[in-house]
Image (cartoon, rainbow, N blue to C red):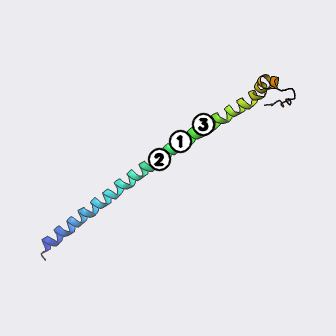
Amino acid sequence: MKKGRIILTAFMMGLALIGLMAMQVYWIQHDLKVKHDRFGQQVVDAMNKAAAQLSTRESVQLITRELPSVLKDSVAEYFDDFPELPEVED
């Protein structure tokens, strides 16, 4: 092979290697961005789930606090031997 062809081949291989490295850097950066975005979405989902659970818990506490008085008023009048319901303290 001629010297010029060897140099040209080495130069083309170097360019190809640089191109491959550039593609790897791009894909690594893209992967990190996707993982960052996914983590942010998981945090938002977890916070929404926690807020929903707190809301449900507060609703249950409100209902259980108000339920004895509602039962006492509406159901107890139909039964002579309706047991006393305990008072719920906060």
Q: CA distance from mark 2 to mark 1?
A: 10 Å
* Quarter of the rendering occupied by the C terminus: top right
Q: Is residue 61 left or right of residue 13?
A: right
Which residue position is annotated with label 1? Answer: 45
Which residue position is annotated with label 3? Answer: 52
All told, the count of numbered labels is: 3
Identify the secondary structure beneath mark 1.
helix
Identify the secondary structure beneath mark 2.
helix
x and y, in percent, of residue 2 in the image = 12, 75
Q: Which mark is residue 66?
A: none
Which residue position is annotated with label 2? Answer: 38
Q: Are marks 1 and 3 in contact (CB under 8 Å)?
A: no
Tell me which label, 2 or 1, sits earlier in the chain: 2
Q: CA distance from mark 3 to mark 2?
A: 21 Å
Tell me which label, 3 or 2, sits earlier in the chain: 2
* Quarter of the rendering occupied by the N terminus: bottom left
x and y, in percent, of residue 5 in the image = 14, 71
Q: Nearer the viewer, mark 3 or mark 2?
A: 3
Residue at image x 64%, y 35%?
56
Tell me which label, 1 or 3, sits earlier in the chain: 1
x and y, in percent, of residue 6 in the image = 17, 72
Other-residue count near label 3 (Cα within 10 Å), few / some / many at <14 / 14–19 / ≥20: few
| Viewer-nearest residue: 90 or 17 | 90
**Mark 3: amino acid:** Ala
Q: Is residue 8 left or right of residue 18?
A: left
